[in-house]
Amino acid sequence: MRDPETIDTELMEISGIADDTVKFERIVTWCATHPDEVPFALHQLMGRRDKHPSETSETEPRQCVTPPGRIRPTRPAARGTSGCP
């Protein structure tokens, strides 16, 4: 495996791409090029996600779309769940 800092730098460059299609293509290419580093990369990305709370507050009501297309607020869900039925 290569240096973790090199891997992190490459992943950060990919994450900075604005076009989702190009970003997806780069991710697929990166994974095909470095298959032995994919578990490490996933671990790094999952750890980074846990360190940065979502932009919405946990006390803010969440929104669920009901079948007719109306939006109704729900109570805050437990961490890791959507709170939608």
Image (cartoon, grey):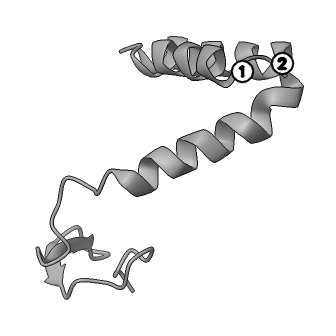
- The image shows residue 15 at horizontal and vertical percentages of 45, 22
Residue that mark 2 sits on:
32
Which residue shows up at 23% across the image and 67% down it?
A: 69
- The image shows residue 18 at horizontal and vertical percentages of 35, 15
Could you classify mark 2 by the number of other residues whose Cα lies within 10 Å: few (under 14), some (14-19), or many (20 or more)?
few
Q: From the image, which quarter does the C terminus lie in?
A: bottom left
Which residue shows up at 16% across the image and 71% down it?
A: 70
Quarter-of-image position of residue 58: bottom left
The disc at residue 28 is 1
Relative to 61, say whether 23 is above or below. Answer: above
Of residue 73 and residue 2, the one placed in the foreground of this image is: 2
Relative to 35, say whether 18 is above or below. Answer: above
Q: Amino acid at mark 1?
A: Val
Q: From the image, which quarter does the N terminus lie in?
A: top right
Relative to 73, say whether 9 is above or below. Answer: above
Which residue shows up at 47% across the image and 20% down it?
A: 12
Of residue 66 and residue 56, the one placed in the foreground of this image is: 56
Q: Are marks 2 and 1 in contact (CB under 8 Å)?
A: yes
- The image shows residue 36 at horizontal and vertical percentages of 88, 28
Secondary structure of residue under mark 1: helix
